[in-house]
Image: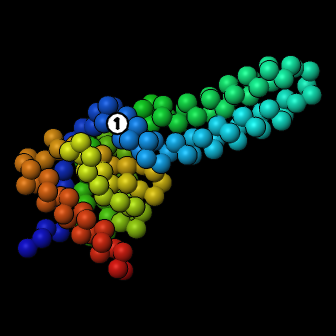
Amino acid sequence: MAPESIRIEYSSLRSEVWKFYWRSWRQRWWKTHLLVFVGVTTAVFVGLHRQGFSPSGEGMFACGCGFLSIVWMPIFPLVRFKPQTRVLEINAEGISTTIGKLSAQRSWHEIVSITEADGNIILLAKSGNAFIVPPRAFDSETARLAFLEFAKSALAASRHN
């Protein structure tokens, strides 16, 4: 008989967040970064046009602004990183999480996918945020696989509702 919910506790590492971001960037986010870079660079270049700067100066400044506009993207999650112990509970309705005094809930409809990478279970939300659950969050491989199966089943069930 399947449990009604599964509750785990773990602390994340900044390196796990970085590895997730880097993997996601290589798979899909590079396109977003490229569009942001081109958009900001173009807007700044057009805005500076005929302001008395040399064309090369305008181009360098515009590229610098474009570069700065994307540099913050991988830095932001690392700055907002929370190393405190997280309580994560999954049930038929979704995911609830607590870190210190902060808590949040996500329904399964907000979750895009559940995957595994480097032994981590990754619950990816539509917003691009992710719950990265490391293997150390579980007492055993059996417990990890039970969590994974429960989460995938709950996600699949939510798709049919």
Residue furthest to the bottom: 161
Direction from residue 112 to residue 90 in the image, left or right:
left
- Place residue 45 in its image quadrant: top right
Please state the horizontal and vertical placement of residue 40, each as a whole percent of the image: 70, 37
Residue at figure coordinates x 26%, y 69% from the top left: 154
**Is residue 125 among what the camera can see?**
yes
* Residue 103 or residue 20, whichever sits in front: 20
Direction from residue 6 to residue 101 in the image, left or right:
right
- Place residue 155 in its image quadrant: bottom left
Q: Which residue is mark 1?
A: 19
Amino acid, disc 1: Lys
Can you say which quadrant of the picture contains the N terminus?
bottom left
Counting labels gives 1
Q: Is residue 138 above or below residue 92?
A: above
Residue at figure coordinates x 79%, y 19% from the top left: 57
* Residue 76 or residue 104, whichever sits in front: 76
Element type at mark 1: helix
> Alpha-carbon neighbours of circle 1 within 10 Å: few (<14), some, or many (≥20)?
few
**Is residue 80 among what the camera can see?**
no
Please state the horizontal and vertical placement of residue 33, each as a whole percent of the image: 57, 41
Direction from residue 55 to residue 36 in the image, left or right:
left
Residue at figure coordinates x 60%, y 41% from the top left: 34
Please state the horizontal and vertical placement of residue 21, each as a whole percent of the image: 41, 39
Can you say which quadrant of the picture contains the C terminus?
bottom left
Residue at figure coordinates x 9%, y 50% from the top left: 141
* Residue 43 or residue 81, whichever sits in front: 43
- Place residue 146 in its image quadrant: bottom left
